[in-house]
Amino acid sequence: MGRVEALRLILLYVHLIGFALLLGGAIAQHLSGKIRINAAMLWGSVVQLLTGIGLSAPLRDGDEPAPAKLVTKLVLALLIFVMVFFSRKRAEVNRGHFLAIVGLTLVTAAVAVFWR
Ligand code: HEM
C-alpha cells in the first residue's frame, strides 16, 4: 500500500469516528432528556470539517469524488458546525434547532454514501 493511500485511509477512519461523536453525542444527549450541545457534538463537528477537507485532496489518483458532492458536504458541515458552535454554552437549546442538527448530520451522511 502506498503512503498516500495509507494517509487517505487514516483520514477516512478519523472521519468515521468524528461522525460517531457527532451523531452518537446528539442521540445520547437527546435520550438524557436535557437538550443541549455536548462536547462530543462540538468536537465531532470540528473533526468532520477538518478530516473532510483533508479527504477532499486528490488522494486517489483518478476516481475522485465529484467536486459538487464535496461542496455540498462542505456547506452542510459548515451549517452543522455553526449551529453547534454558537449554542455550545446554552444550558438548553430549542428542540427544533437540536433536531435540525441531527437531521443535517443524517443528510450529510446520506450524501456521502449515495452520491456516486
Ligand atoms: C457532518 C459532516 C459529515 C458527515 C456526517 C460525513 C460522513 C461521511 C461518511 C459516512 C463517509 C464514508 C463514505 C464512504 O466512504 O463511502 C464520508 C467520506 C468522505 N467525506 Fe464526509 N462527512 C461529513 C463532512 C465532510 C466534509 C465537510 C467533507 C469535505 C468538504 C467531506 C468529504 C468526504 C470525502 C472526500 C470522503 C471520502 C469518500 C467519498 O466521498 O467517496 N465530508 N463522509
Image (cartoon, grey):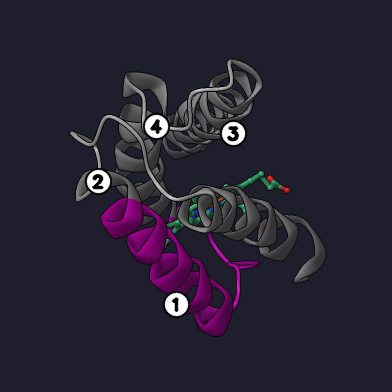
Write the residue at 48% across / 32% down.
Answer: 35
Contact? badges 3 and 4 (CB < 8 Å): no
Whether residue 24 is visible: yes
Label 1 or label 2, whichever lies nearer to me, is 2
The x and y percentages for residue 78 are 33, 63
Q: Which residue is mark 3?
A: 23
Q: CA distance from mark 2 to mark 4?
A: 8 Å
Could you tell which of marks 1 and 4 lies nearer the N-terminus?
Answer: 4
Among the two numbered marks 3 and 2 on one chain, the one whose residue lies closer to the N terminus: 3
| Tag 2 residue | 87
Q: Are marks 3 and 2 in contact (CB under 8 Å)?
A: no
Mark identifier at residue 36 = 4
Which secondary structure, mark 4? loop
Q: Nearer the viewer, mark 1 or mark 4?
A: 4
* Contact (Cβ within 8 Å) of mark 1 with mark 3: no
Q: Nearer the viewer, residue 33 or 28?
A: 33
**Is 96 on the left-hand or right-hand side of 63?**
left
The residue labelled by disc 1 is 71
Magenta stretch in the rendered image: 56-83
Beta carbon of the mark 1 residue lies under 8 A of ligand 1? yes
Residue kind at label 2, given as amino acid type:
Ser
Label 2: which secondary element: loop
